Amino acid sequence: MKILAVECSDKPASCAVVEDGKIICESFLSIGATHSQTLQPMVKDMLKNADIDISTVDEFAVSVGPGSFTGLRIGISAVKGMAFGCDKPCVGVSTLHAAAYGMIANRGIICAVMDARCGQVYTATFFSDGEKLKRLCDDRAIMLDELVTDLKNLKSNGEYKNEGIFLVGRGNEMCYNKIKDEVSGVRLAPPHCCCQRASYVALVAPEYDKISAHELLPSYLRLPQAERELKAKKEKI
């Protein structure tokens, strides 16, 4: 099974091809350039350098959220186009699940976090036994104080009392500064494990259902800012 994956839910953009659980090639950029300018050339150059014909790809995977609304739309649109053109299925992967996969070899609680602005974080928590991930909660958009409470409650559970907590994802340093003095056993994951990467998207893709390009949709977890502001104005009327 050959999977081409795309990840551009935040500032970095990446694409990768994984075949039967092994990374064949990957391209990664974190330079602040617009994903609409960099993503397609990255995919084209990666396939050319690896001598892979896109028609040999069995399915296309992409992180569908949470994350940057614009970034998610760009990544999903790119995958929709490639999958439709090749008449192949798609897989939509949780951004937070893919981020957590980077620490799968480390036993402990893995908390994936992204800055959702306005005092909120996008987050999901997993447990790794060193070989596989067990999801402990759904993807959520919550206040940072709520995350502190949730992690404290999780640590009070006898099953996870002695487990360390690894913070991964693009919001991990911000969360660490808030959590470190309130929750025991919290540590930052190594920098190379913290970025959302297309290879992680591809590696967790087999756990998700295959869908058509038409069915592939983003999972924002909350309304875009413009819609939130409009809703607030209507509620005041």
Image (cartoon, rainbow, N blue to C red):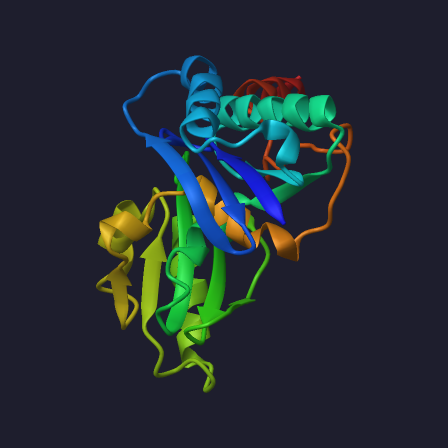
Rendered residue at 49%/19% (across/down): 40
Rendered residue at 44%/56% (across/down): 100
Name the residue nearer the viewer: 128 or 201.
201
Say whether residue 196 is left or right of residue 222. left
Say whether residue 124 is left or right of residue 185. right
Evaluate whether residue 235 shows in this view: no
Query: Number of numbered discs present?
Result: 0
62 over 185 or under it: above or below: above
Q: Which quarter of the picture shows residue 166?
A: bottom left
**Percent x, y of residue 46:** 43, 28
**Percent x, y of residue 183:** 30, 68
Q: Which quarter of the picture shows residue 110?
A: bottom left
18 over 136 or under it: above or below: above
Rendered residue at 40%/69% (across/down): 109
**Percent x, y of residue 123:** 47, 51
Evaluate whether residue 2 shows in this view: yes
Point out the residue furthest to the front here: 51
Q: Quadrant of the C terminus?
A: top right
133 over 100 or under it: above or below: below
